[in-house]
Image: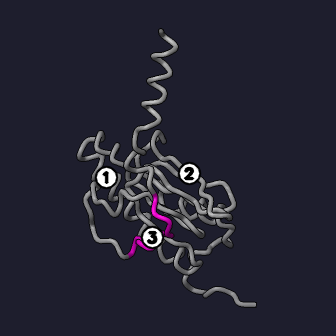
Amino acid sequence: MRLATLCIIGILSSCRPAPRDAYVPNRSDSLAFNDMAAHDSADSALLTPRVVTGPTVIVFWLPAADTLSADDQAQALDDLNNATDHIAPMLKRHDIKLLPTNAETIYVALPNHQRRTILLSGVDYPFGYVLVEPGTAERILAGVYNDDELKDELEAYFDLPPGADSTATGPRIS
């Protein structure tokens, strides 16, 4: 009797529809950080999981940040925005996308129409950065980083020359 009950439960549970966020449209993400206005953390455009197709820095602010006090949220958001504004020109010069998200899932496009999943739920802080270069392991920078630490992380991950943020010289063409 117990075996029959388990079989029925197994059959019924396999008939359930997929979760709402299991569907990811087959498109690369075209919503850029610079194109975004200030949005609510429940904005549906930001809750759609990102599909990364090239070198990208994703700035994430998860709904779990709502558990922080209002003062802590405001301070963290200000620090995150300031650091992001500071690195944006360097990323643009090196053709690295900068994308915002409130989604807890990021997909990295792989060859043969496959995707690798990056889950952000459960990281130490519900905000930070994800550095992604398809074909290599991602780097999750949870929390707030000061400008110099963030630049160092970007230079190391994307193999940028030291001082890549300097505006005095343009990219060297050989």
Picture coordinates of residue 22 (x, y %)? 44, 50
Which residue corresponds to the image point at 53% horizontal and 57% vertical from the top-left? 107
Judge left or right: residue 132 versus residue 145.
right
Picture coordinates of residue 99 (x, y %)? 45, 67
Examine the rendered structure and indicate whether residue 24 appears above or below residue 17: below
Tell whether position 29 is magenta.
yes
Question: What residue does disc 3 label?
Answer: 86
Picture coordinates of residue 162 (x, y %)? 66, 70
Along the viewing direction, whichever of 46 and 36 lies nearer the viewer? 46
Name the kind of residue labelled 1 in the image.
Gln
Which residue corresponds to the image point at 49% horizontal and 56% vertical from the top-left? 129
Taking the view exactly as shown, the residue that stands out farthest to the bottom is: 174
Q: CA distance from mark 3 to mark 2?
A: 28 Å
Taking the view exactly as shown, the residue that stands out farthest to the top is: 1
Question: Element at badge 3?
Answer: helix
Q: Closer to the N terminus: mark 2 or mark 1?
A: 1
Picture colour scheme = one colour
Pointer 2: residues within 10 angstroms few (<14), some, or many (20+)? few
Magenta residues span: 24-34
Picture coordinates of residue 70 (x, y %)? 23, 46
Question: What residue does disc 2 label?
Answer: 117
Name the kind of residue labelled 2 in the image.
Thr
Question: What residue does disc 1 label?
Answer: 75
Judge left or right: residue 70 versus residue 170.
left
Tell whether position 146 is magenta.
no
Question: Element at badge 1?
Answer: helix
Occupied quadrant, residue 102: bottom left
Question: Element at badge 2?
Answer: strand
Q: CA distance from mark 1 to mark 3?
A: 17 Å
